[in-house]
Image (cartoon, grey):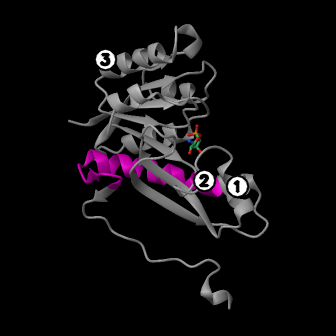
Amino acid sequence: MKLRLGVLISGRGSNLQALIDACRDPDFPAEVALVISNKADAGGLARAAAAGIPSLVLKPKDFADKPAHEAAMTAALEQAGVGLVCLAGFMRLLTGGFVAHWHDRLINIHPSLLPSFPGIDTHARALAAGVRFHGCTVHYVREVMDEGPIIVQAAVPVLTGDTPDDLAARVLVQEHLVYPLAVRLIGEGRVRVEGAVTHIERAVVPAPVISPAPSSL
Ligand code: GRF
């Protein structure tokens, strides 16, 4: 049986799209069962509709408080038989109660090489820090924002003259690769969480990279 995904969004949903596209492969071990948005105008809702995936808009202001909003999300996710919740541009902090309920069944994609640059404006902050690499991280969610065992990361070089938008676009291409990869690894039962870290079975590691490349000497 395939792992059933619940994808939580707030916006354009390009990472949702990457997951939808990956799930089209009959060999992919997961399927998107439900999309939940906290905003009625999230672009990702049209992507879900186009793929024939059920979606729900649950607006926080329609609930008494945050725990009530989250309880409604959990009820809908469980009703849909969701086994893994994927945050994909979901712009709301989750309470410890929600995070504990979905412990090791809740993952997030963040546009930086964590633990560097948690929070917002990661691309501008990476440029200001002068790092030679930036990237993205898929990780299990813990109560502290943008913290939790790392599953997959992708690094991209920072180029002279990059604007935050240039860098964001370069990172986004990788986001669309690593999120499905992380879901595949989980769906294939190859990710083991041990304390603050994960171990990936049969992982193929890439060659080290230097930036600027030694050939520029
Ligand atoms: C992505 O950059 C993701 O890493 C961050 O929010 C953005 C969402 O983009 N958490 P999209 O809605 O998936 O296009």
Locate the C terminus by quadrant: bottom right
Image point (49%, 53%), residue name: 137
Nearer-the-camera pick, 71 or 54: 71
* Distance from the alpha carbon under mark 2 to that under mark 3: 35 Å
**Residue situated furthest left in the rendering:** 1
What crowding class fits label 1: few (fewer than 14 Cα within 10 Å), some (14-19), or many (20 or more)? some
Mark 2 or 1, nearer chain start? 2
Residue type at mark 3? Gln
User: Circle 3 is placed at which residue position?
Assistant: 79
SS category of the residue bearing label 3: helix
User: Circle 1 is placed at which residue position?
Assistant: 125
Residue type at mark 2? Phe
| Residue contact between numbered discs 3 and 1, judged by CB atoms under 8 Å | no
* Distance from the alpha carbon under mark 3 to that under mark 1: 40 Å
Quarter of the displayed picture in which ligand 1 can be seen: top right
Above/below status of 197 relative to 50: below
Image point (37%, 17%), residue name: 76
User: Circle 2 is placed at which residue position?
Assistant: 117
SS category of the residue bearing label 2: loop
For residue 176: magenta? Answer: yes
Q: Which residues are magenta?
A: 169-197
